[in-house]
Image (spheres, rainbow, N blue to C red):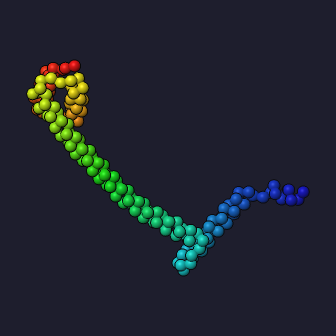
Amino acid sequence: MEAITGLTQIDFSYAFISIFAILIGIKAIVSLFEWIINKLGIETKSTRCRREEHELLIKTSQELCTLQEKLAFLTNTVNGIAKTLKNMHEKDNETKLKELKSSLIRYYNKYKEIGEWSKLEKDAFWDLFNEYEKRGGDGYIHTIVEPLMREIKEIE
């Protein structure tokens, strides 16, 4: 019973302030201890962890820089390949356009003299002509060859 009576008579504000002061004192001692350790150059677990984290951060940063350089190189390489493919496609289109033009001129020279052609020959010519137009062909094929070829008589 005396213990309970004694607890009721304790000044709790004084106890709280005392505990708070003790904690502040412990914190000051720990800080002083850390300062001394740092000045002496002694490595503790926490300083080792901080150093390792710092080294990891630096290594990660360097690796990111290397990755960015590799990505830039890769991007330039892909862009170069795309440009080369585009040029190849354009040259292929030009070559095919010249071949089609040559074929259309052969048809023109042959059938302007004859003045008539079969349905099969006519269909073959107009298929070539349509392909020529799809590939961007223009010029005298449209102004000279096409009008004459439209007038040629189809035979059975």
Is residue 62 rendered to the left or right of residue 90? right
Residue name at image x 34 percent, y 58 percent: 73
Q: Nearer the viewer, residue 90 or 68?
A: 90
Residue 56's spot in the image, x, y percent? Answer: 50, 65
**Which image quadrant is residue 33 in?**
bottom right
Residue 141 shows in the view? no
Q: Nearer the viewer, residue 8 or 116?
A: 116
Residue name at image x 45 percent, y 66 percent: 58
* The C terminus, quarter of image: top left
Residue name at image x 52 percent, y 70 percent: 51
Residue 6 shows in the view? yes
Taking 28 as reference, is 40 above or below it? below
Residue name at image x 72 percent, y 60 percent: 15
Taking 8 as reference, is 146 above or below it? above
Q: Nearer the viewer, residue 64 or 96?
A: 96
**Which image quadrant is residue 101 in?**
top left
Is residue 151 rendered to the left or right of residue 41? left
Residue 105's spot in the image, x, y percent? Answer: 14, 34
Is residue 136 rendered to the left or right of residue 50? left
Work out which residue is located at the far right of the displayed protein and give it: 1
* The N terminus, quarter of image: bottom right
Taking 134 as reference, is 81 above or below it? below
Is residue 22 rendered to the left or right of residue 60? right
Q: How many marks?
A: 0
Work out which residue is located at the far bottom of the displayed protein and give it: 40
Q: Nearer the viewer, residue 32 or 100?
A: 100
Residue 132's spot in the image, x, y percent? Answer: 21, 33
Work out which residue is located at the far front of the displayed protein and give it: 156
**Which image quadrant is residue 14 in?**
bottom right
